[in-house]
């Protein structure tokens, strides 16, 4: 009788242990700047990720397991990003990492994931080189993916807006000194060269600079009619405020970061009218987008019901669903199998930005093509559609262009 009792207890323990093992969560790294000047993007991205994880877990998780976000603040510092990457890989044993807001942090950190054969989603960092860091033939397989509009898409859009749509002849470029700013500046100059235009001024500044007077005076004296920018919110606000102090106002057209709350709020009236490419504008023009916006506002309660960085939040949210679809298809969390599944997704993934239909291949790890972003404009302390035509068609889902068309930008709407 005693032996039977012991066997029953042993069997029960084995069953309990087995169930506990089967229910171990799937750990996903979520890395970004949650403090400092880039935090507007980082926190919005993180919260978009958390919202998607909560939804998936409530629906039963993935492969019968719950997703678990392992959050780390990289402070927008390259060295901190490197430390986090090694910790998430070696200690936390994450199956993938989502995030990388800053291009420099991505370039410094993602090599560790590449070596460990663990997929990475760059759902905000836009430097054109990010997904090209580990190219064939030196690297037969690439573990770096992205679902943001990279700078080789954005820069031509910015130039098209300034030169073709708005007919400015004299342009100045103001870019920060980071990898993001300088790589973006190079992309802008290439796009201007393609239009036969040479900028009248090209000026650089550092993160945390508060006086842009020298750069702005050079642009003004050169006769600039428009300022093209590549930087992040706080310094972009200093550009707008600097123009106000000088009593000189010309339009600002720049990368998507002109939509950051800490640009809009700190620039105040000086930021009105700034335009930038956007993959997502906070308008509930589809059922999916309404559910996302409602869920985000209810869960995180941002000030004035405005997501600090709508693009970051939406792309963070979508990256979770893409990863979940790949794990489900692979039937495992093994990095090699998940990468292979991402490169050949068999099911469509309905996201906030777009519906992803085979968004990646072995040689193409960019989910966003040039036909997807539209132009946003700062108006009344928020970002709205810059063009009425885009607003009217906001409910139309723009999907990834076929490879043969991917290099061709969409036709611009008329002003």
Image: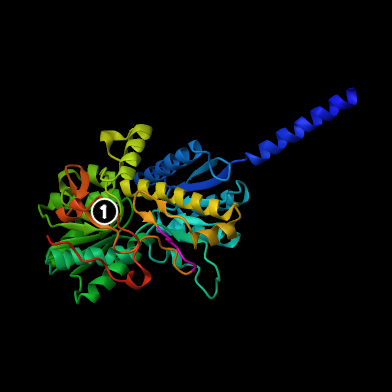
User: Residue 29 at what x, y percent from top left?
Assistant: 52, 47
* Position above or below: 182 against 74: below
The image position of residue 145, as x and y in percent, is 46, 60
Camera-side residue: 319 or 83? 319
Q: Residue furthest left?
A: 247
Magenta segment: 357-362
Query: Does residue 51 appear in this view?
Result: yes
Q: Residue at x 84, y 24 (%)?
A: 5
Tell me which residue sits at (37%, 70%) in the image. 403
Left or right: 25 in relation to 71: right
Q: Which of the two residues, 127 or 174, is positioned nearer the viewer here?
A: 127
Q: Residue at x 62, y 47 (%)?
A: 91
Q: Which residue is mark 1?
A: 396
Q: Residue furthest top?
A: 1
Left or right placement of residue 349 versus residue 192 in this view? right
Query: Which picture quadrant has residue 146?
Result: bottom left
Q: How is the image coloured?
A: rainbow
Q: Is residue 359 magenta?
A: yes
Query: Could you tell me which residue is drawn at 15 percent across and 51 percent down?
Result: 273
x and y, in percent, of residue 180 in the image? 36, 60
Q: Position of residue 334 (x, y in %)?
A: 61, 55
Task: Report the number of discs.
Answer: 1
Residue 210 showing in the rendered view = no
Quadrant where the N terminus is found in the figure: top right
Bin the neighbour count of mark 1 within 10 Å (Cα to Cα): few under 14, some 14-19, many 20 and up: few
Report the front residue among 4 and 366: 4
Identify the image quadrant of the C terminus: bottom left
Mark 1, secondary structure of its residue: loop
State yes or no: residue 388 in magenta. Answer: no
**Main SS of residues in magenta:** loop
């Amino acid at each position: 009788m005693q032996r039977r009792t012991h066997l029953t207890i042993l069997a029960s323990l084995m069953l309990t242990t087995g169930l506990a093992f089967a229910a171990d969560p799937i750990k996903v790294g979520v890395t970004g700047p949650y403090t400092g000047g880039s935090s507007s993007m980082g926190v919005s991205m993180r919260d978009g990720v958390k919202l998607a994880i909560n939804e998936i877990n409530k629906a039963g998780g993935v492969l019968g397991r719950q997703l678990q976000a392992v959050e780390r603040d990289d402070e927008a510092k390259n060295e901190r990003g490197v430390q986090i990457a090694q910790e998430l890989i070696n200690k936390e044993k994450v199956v993938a990492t989502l995030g990388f807001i800053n291009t420099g942090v991505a370039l410094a950190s993602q090599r560790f994931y590449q070596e460990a054969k663990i997929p990475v989603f760059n759902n905000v960092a836009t430097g054109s080189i990010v997904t090209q860091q580990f190219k064939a033939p030196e690297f037969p397989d690439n573990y770096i993916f992205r679902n943001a509009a990279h700078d080789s898409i954005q820069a031509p859009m910015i130039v098209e807006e300034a030169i073709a749509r708005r007919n400015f002849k004299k342009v100045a470029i103001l870019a920060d000194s980071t990898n993001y700013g300088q790589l973006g500046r190079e992309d802008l100059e290439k796009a201007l060269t393609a239009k036969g235009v040479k900028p009248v001024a090209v000026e650089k500044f550092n993160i945390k600079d508060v006086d842009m007077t020298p750069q702005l005076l050079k642009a003004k004296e050169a006769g600039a009619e428009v300022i093209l920018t590549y930087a992040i919110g706080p310094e972009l606000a200093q550009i707008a405020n600097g123009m106000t102090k000088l009593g000189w106002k010309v339009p600002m057209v720049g990368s998507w970061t002109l939509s950051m709350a800490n640009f809009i709020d700190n620039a105040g009236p000086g930021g009105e009218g700034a335009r930038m490419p956007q993959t997502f504008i906070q308008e509930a023009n589809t059922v999916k987008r309404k559910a996302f916006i409602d869920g985000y506002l209810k869960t995180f309660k941002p000030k004035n019901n405005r997501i600090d960085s709508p693009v970051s939040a939406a792309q963070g949210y979508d990256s979770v669903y893409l990863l979940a679809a790949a794990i489900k298809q692979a039937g495992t969390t093994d990095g090699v199998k998940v990468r292979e599944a991402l490169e050949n997704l068999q099911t469509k993934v309905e996201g906030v930005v777009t519906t992803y239909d085979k968004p990646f291949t072995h040689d193409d790890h960019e989910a966003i093509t040039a036909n997807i972003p539209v132009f946003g404009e700062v108006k009344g302390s928020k970002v709205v559609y810059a063009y009425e035509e885009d607003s009217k068609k906001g409910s139309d889902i723009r999907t990834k262009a076929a490879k043969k068309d991917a290099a061709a930008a969409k036709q611009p709407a008329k002003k």
